[in-house]
Amino acid sequence: MHFRNHSTFLLILFFLTPPLAKGEGIGAALVAEAEDLLGVPFAEYPRREPGKYHPTELKQYTNCAGVVIYGLRRVGILMRYTSAAGLRRVLSKMDWEIHAPATFRTGDIFFFGNQSALLTRDTEPKGRLNDSDEFLYAHYAPVKKGLWRDLPFRQPEYGIFRPVTAR
């Protein structure tokens, strides 16, 4: 099936995606979709050229926010590509922020200043951050998975968002 317009494809994908119960997390689906970007080269400011697809959509290059937005778009949450700071502002308006003490789970989106990462595997003890929890991110290198203890941008202060559907 060929679509002339990428937006038409995303709109059709959105309506074909089975609805979740209101407030149900979409973390596992988000992670599965975002993992398609593993190995995609890093670009600090990926920009869409007029009349063309965003480079993240084409898997040419991406940044930390692009990894998260790519996954969100694939699970039916349509949003523009933006910076990590812009993504955080959008997610804040969606009332997805969770606060400590929180129980973390797969698909939670973490922000460390201007860097974002996606929790892909929550290891024992479940629901608590520990050194062996796994994240998907892009940080001056191709998109990869890394352990909490090894994240190069890890900070003591971070924000967490849990995507849920409002449908």
Image: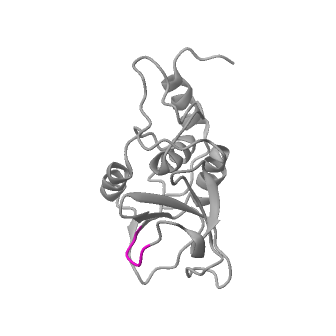
Residue lying at 60% horizontally and 35% vertically, measured from the top left: 59
Q: Quadrant of residue 121?
A: bottom right
Q: Is residue 3 above or below residue 32?
A: above
Colour basis: one colour
Q: Is residue 54 magenta?
A: no
Quadrant (top left, top right, bottom left, bottom right) of the N terminus? top right
**Left or right of 142 in this view: 92:** left
Residue 62 coordinates in the image, percent (x, y): 52, 41
Q: Quadrant of residue 48?
A: top left
Q: Nearer the viewer, residue 44 or 51?
A: 44
Residue 156 on the magenta segment: yes
Given residues 94 and 106, the one toward you in this image is 106
Q: Which residues are magenta?
A: 155-159
Q: Main secondary structure of the magenta part?
A: loop
Q: Quadrant of residue 17?
A: top right
Q: Is residue 156 above or below residue 3?
A: below
Residue at (47, 71) in percent of width and height: 154
Give how far across and how far down residue 31 sits, in percent: 62, 55
